[in-house]
Amino acid sequence: MRVSFAVAYYFVPSCPAESWVAGQEGGTPEMVEGSIAPDNVNKHEHCGESAQEMSIADAIQHFEQEYMGRSSRYIRVYLVKDIAVVRARGMLSPAERQLASTHEGRVLIKQLWVKEMEGLKSVLRYRLECLIGMPLSGLTLDIDPREDEWIAVIRLRPESSWG
């Protein structure tokens, strides 16, 4: 079962500078090759990632920490023309990973995550718009509990690009 979300279009005329503090209780999440260390966002030497990719990954990590109470161990951002794909892995707790071993458990995890994100999607969208400095054309989110992974597809307006 694939769940997609309706996208609301709106314009944020000006965004105040946001500062996100990741009060990390467990220290820095475990890092996997190809990911960035959240504390090193302003260091541009990580895996050839651009400053924009690292900034988006950092914003996602801080959003997860602040609103979900935990963050993914691996966050990777891919920029292609007017689209960014965010791949975040390793966000389930050990109990949730155990629950995800059955079909019914995966359905429950997905239903809960979808319900949580329905309320938080506008917050994530606002933060991303502030970060990139322009309104988004769309934001689509999905989770795969079996793979312990969630995906975000960030779409800019058609005439825009990541520069």
Image (spheres, rainbow, N blue to C red):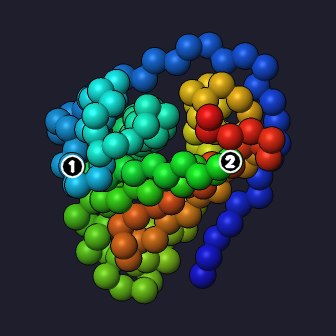
User: Disc 2 marks which amino acid?
Assistant: Asp
Numbered mark located on residue 82 in the image: 2
User: Disc 1 marks which amino acid?
Assistant: Met
10 Å crowding of disc 2: few (<14), some (14-19), many (20+): some
Residue 99 versus residue 155 in the image, above or below: below
Task: Please report whichever mark, 1 or 2, sits nearer to the chain's N-terminal start.
Answer: 1
**Tag 1, which secondary structure?**
loop
Q: Quarter-wise, where is residue 23 in the image?
A: top left
Residue 128 versus residue 91 in the image, above or below: above
Residue found at x 22% / y 44%: 29
10 Å crowding of disc 1: few (<14), some (14-19), many (20+): some
Residue 5 versus residue 15 in the image, above or below: below
| Quarter containing the N terminus | bottom right
Task: Tell me if residue 146 can be seen.
Answer: yes
Q: Position of residue 47 (x, y in %)?
A: 29, 45
| Quarter containing the C terminus | top right
Residue 61 versus residue 84 in the image, above or below: above
Residue found at x 74% / y 33%: 135
Q: Quarter-wise, where is residue 121 in the image?
A: top right
Q: Left or right: 157 with respect to 61? A: right
Q: Left or right: 160 with respect to 38? A: right
Q: Nearer the viewer, residue 30 or 96?
A: 30
Q: Are marks 1 and 2 in contact (CB under 8 Å)?
A: no
**Which residue in the structure is indicated by mark 1?**
31
Residue found at x 65% / y 49%: 81
Q: Nearer the viewer, residue 61 or 45?
A: 45
Task: Tell me if residue 22 can be seen.
Answer: no
Q: Left or right: 89 with respect to 26? A: right
